[in-house]
Image (spheres, rainbow, N blue to C red):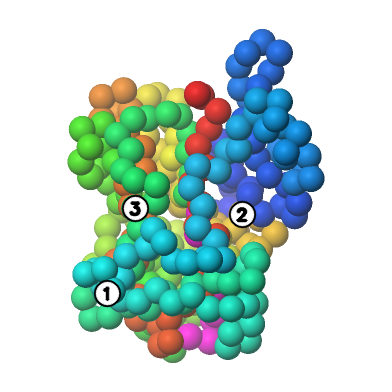
Amino acid sequence: MGNSQVNSPAAINSRIANKVKICHLTGKGDYILLEVNQNALAAHLAHGDIDQIYYHQGFENNIGGWFDSNDGWFGEVTRVSSGTNGIPSSVGDWHAIFEGDEDSAPFSRFDGYVDTWSGTWSAELDIYLDPNWITSQGFDYTVAANGSDGNHQRDFIFHVNKDASTGKLLVAGSNNTNFAPREDLENINHYEVTTAGWYTLQHVFYDNGSGILAVDLNLLDSSGNVLFTETRSSPSDVISTEIGGNRYGWFTFLNVDGGIGGDEQEIFRNCAL
């Protein structure tokens, strides 16, 4: 089993029913992160508060923001209604099916590449995981940090594989992909998924307290509970001189028969405005 303790700005829980996170304008003219009821959001926005979600794709209307073979990329993204193949959408009435091909799989630039560090931020994507997948099927999914020079800085990768030696559906994390299933996940920090359902792949990017970028790869259940954390950090990722914001989200490979369900792709940024 993996480490479920979080020693960072914590998993950013965006899944609590009827709750949303906002940047709340205080009487002193600064902003603080605040969680409010959904039905109170309009009043807060009218007051001058700011919705904390900077990017959201819930697939309710389209698949915009994702690139597949129709755009000269790889794999396929298909929008399907809730209940397709017996799977209800994570949120709302629609979700996506992501499929890979022999070269790669779908890719997203979120709200565009960002070369400025604005403080703690996170990226999330809901994925339907099923322990009944065929052996050696799974995917790698990365969210990359952009450099302050506008170039690629580093990948932070979730590995998900129905392990050949143990027969278990395992989740782990690293900074590199082999564009193929990793069959050694049982030997590193990992989590075993035993129940089919929606899970959130969450990347939290933050200052580790020494001016160095750290990233927590958190696996959350459908209630927002943190099941697993892999923390990655490199001394060369100095925030003041090297680190910008988000770059891409990318399935570097995906070989699950029929694809996998995906929903609620989001970027959250902090209130340092």
Q: Calculate the distance from the C-alpha at mark 3 to the C-alpha at mark 2.
A: 26 Å
Q: Are marks 1 and 2 in contact (CB under 8 Å)?
A: no
Q: Which residue is mark 1?
A: 69
- Residue flagged by tag 1: what amino acid is it? Ser
The reply to whether callout 1 and callout 3 are in contact (CB within 8 Å) is no
> Residue 193's spot in the image, x, y percent?
56, 72
Judged from the image, the secondary structure of the residue bearing numbered disc 2 is strand
Which amino acid, by three-letter code, is at mark 2?
Answer: Val
The residue located at (27%, 46%) in the rendering is 154
Q: Secondary structure at mark 3?
A: loop
Please tell me how many numbered marks the rendered image carries: 3
Name the N-terminal-most of marks 3 and 2: 3
Which residue position is annotated with label 3? 109
Query: Which residue is depicted at the point 65% across and 29% down?
Result: 49
Query: Is the residue 83 above or below the residue 11 in the image?
Result: below
Q: Which residues lie in the magenta part?
A: 124-133
**Residue annotated with mark 2:** 226
User: Which amino acid, by three-letter code, is at mark 3?
Assistant: Arg
Q: CA distance from mark 1 to mark 3?
A: 15 Å
